[in-house]
Amino acid sequence: MNDFDDSTLIGWLRTLGGEQLQRLFAARPDGTRTPAPLTLGEFADRLQRTGSVVRPLERLPLPCLQAAEALAALPGPCAPESLERLLGTDPDTLAPVLDILTGLALVWPDANGQLHMAPALRRAWESPLGMGPGLAELLDSHTSEDLRVIATALGLKPGTRRQARHEAILAHHEDEEKLLELIDSAPTAARALLHEYAGVGGSDEAAGTFTTMSAGSAERWLLARALLVRREWVYEPAQVPVEVIRALRGPSWHAPFDPAPPEPDAAGLVRVAASEVEREASAAATAFAGQAAGILAECATRPPATLKSGGIGARELAKLGKAADCPGPVVRLVLETAYAAGLLSHEGTRVLVTTAYDAWAAGAPADRFTLLLRAWWLLGLTPSSSRDEDGKALPALARRASCSGCRAGRHGVVDAATTLPDGHGVRDVGVLGQLISWHRPFADVDPQDETPFASVIHEAELVGVLARGALSPLGTALLTGEPTAPYVAAARLLPAATGRARFGADLTAVVSGEPTARLATLLDSLADRESRSAASVWRFSPASVRRALDRGQTPTGIEADLLDVSETSERPLPQPLSYLIADIARRHGKVRVASASCVLHSEDTALLAEIAAHSALSHLGLRAIAPTVLLCRTDASATLEALRGAGYAPVAETGDGTVSVQRAPRPRADPPLPPEDLIPGAREAGHPPQDRGVAGRELAERLLASPDRRPHPAPLAGGPAYDSDTEEILDGYAQSLSLTDIRQFAHAIHTDEPLTIEYISASGARTVRTVSGIALDPPHIVAHCHLRDAERVFTISRIRDVLPA
């Protein structure tokens, strides 16, 4: 016989086997985040924290939330039969719903089959199903004399003890027939007032119901019989007990319950073959990978400026879109996913690519695409959204607070697509929108969407998760939750990068497919890119070749590099291209500009005479002091720019007379994520970053063998000794935190991990902040606040809750 109470979560967890406990670890990973729980009681505490309970709610489908709300409306614990009656369903239909809730430890049964509910989940509804508290809770503050008056008014024998009076009143109201008889016997005015309080439509008896009985008299009549109850010493209006509301609604009323998703209209479906879906998904993913490479390359060359209020504004977004030849939604999608993946970072008034960008750009298309796809899957916002609820323009990378509803909408798209009939897609997004609302009831609809969830569905199409209205292999891979699955699917769908180009006599270079990083860098240094699509086109020009020569390249080296990447390397380059390189090289450096404010000199006296007489260069203040020397009143850099703008090819000299090689700066920011999360293909190659959660058979066995509660204040054997002093200090100041919270708090301080805290400011305002780099300075902590992007001081005693970020 068990010596523990299985009505508590700890007791129920002890009834589970090792495999069941491991499945719970996977379903609720925040419960096993480092530091690993030392006891089953600590694990249960983590699972019942409000922040932990809220997280799985966004993954629950509609029937699970409906069943949970109905369970919250019933006095707990309750038998499954009571829940079945309230929902108007049968055991077979309800069983899979309860299995989901039980698998998440949100609901659990005891040995007698009674259903218990996590207290934080019960508090999620202020008035579940529109019902108030039960009569037992409402009468809890009433004195024995108050109960005697109510029992007498009901015609009951009040007895002499408070408990007997309390039980008699409860028994009367639990008898629905007696309760309905009492309501029917009420004066008309009292009956109308009761229906008004309960929000239940009555018989609409005459508008003048209070002419014979005042509203106050009607309320007193109801209060005297516990049809309305006003709690003592609480400033709140009278409430209708849940037993009365259920009686008023009648036996035929059932709580909403939709166990099956809505059937999509056949007219909204379209047949589509699996090969078509793969082909469309491959084209979309390939295009997105190329667009992302172009947009981020533009950011690396010309970092976009940010607004004073934060984020990249519409003007900068338009410039990026024009330079990379991408529409606005794609630009926003790339920027937000790249920022989340650690490829972009804010640096003062600009957004710079990070040091991780170079490794990403050098990776294969599947590596690059997978990193952005996983970032999109986990984003807490809708990247393509450009307007807020008031219609105002939204900047990109504005570092908005994470929105779980946006993430739920994204996951709901994939869940909804799995329910479509085999071999079918949808004609329009409206069909998927209905299914998303069933799969993810907490999903947020973007304010700019004319059709619900149109923006997030369009994003899924842009990244190839949806194709022809059906789920692609990329979407299926995301659903598995396996870190390597998206990479495997992307490697199969995305073609390998090509390192060859086809050079034409029209001074173009054409690359079919995605160019390798080496090829793209080479062509970008020698030509101007004109288009990005299934085939990218570069065009050579005198200015582009001159830029290469300015960076120190030689004509012989340029031709050798181009021949090395040519599809027809056994043949020479097209004659016009060879002539262009030779002609620019012949003229390059004929004029030299030395710093003196400045001096131009050249062996070509005719060329210098031409420059001195050029009308467009008159503002430079040129003056000949010798046939081979011109003096200039303008500084060297401005003179170089003016001469190049006029069509000449000058070079700059250093102080010792050698040619100054000009190289474009490559500003980089530090990545905000750990390096292992940013290396393309690191996870997919079988080298995942260190798992923050601790799960497995060893943990399950250790927890099942541990005592229910951790002794206080000494840590258990096997716990991190370095935390004990910090825990003791925190325990002295953080009176609102449990031992579980204190242990996680101490761990975050010692390991420099980010932490989410619920904080009460000096003004009494409640706020949730994510902080990192926490330094303990009792009675305060000093940490970097991610919301304010600045260092802040927090009083430990004002911290009400902690949760891993």
Image (cartoon, grey):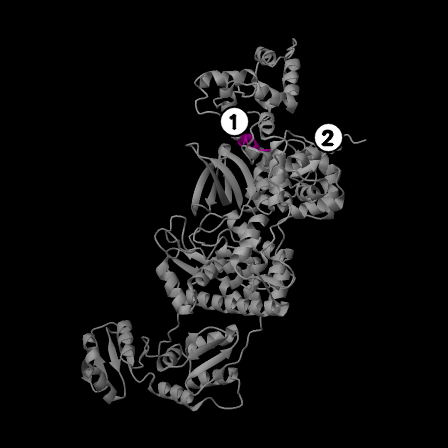
12 sits to left or right of 323:
right
Magenta stretch encompasses residue 735 = yes
- Give the mark nearer the N terminus: 1 vs 2: 2
Q: Give the percent coordinates (x, y) of residue 675.
A: 55, 58
Going by the picture, which residue comes out furthest to the front?
206
Residue ID at (64%, 24%): 176
- The amino acid at mark 1 is His
Magenta stretch encompasses residue 487 = no
Q: Give the percent coordinates (x, y) of residue 433.
A: 53, 53
Residue ID at (49%, 33%): 798
Distance between mark 1 and mark 2 Cα atoms: 41 Å
Residue ID at (24%, 75%): 598
- Name the residue carrying label 2: 5
Secondary-structure class at tag 1: helix
Please say if 210 is above or below 448: above
Q: Give the percent coordinates (x, y) of residue 260.
A: 64, 48
Residue 694 visible:
no
Going by the picture, which residue comes out furthest to the top?
160
Residue stretch rendered in magenta on the structure: 729-738
Please tell me in which quadrant of the rendered image residue 73 appears.
top right
Please say if 278 is above or below 738: below
Q: Mark 2: give few (<14), some (14-19) or many (20+) Cα within 10 Å.
A: few
Q: Give the percent coordinates (x, y) of residue 381.
A: 49, 52
Secondary-structure class at tag 2: loop
- Name the residue carrying label 1: 195
| Residue nearer the viewer, 708 or 141 | 141
As drawn, the label of residue 448 is none
- The amino acid at mark 2 is Asp
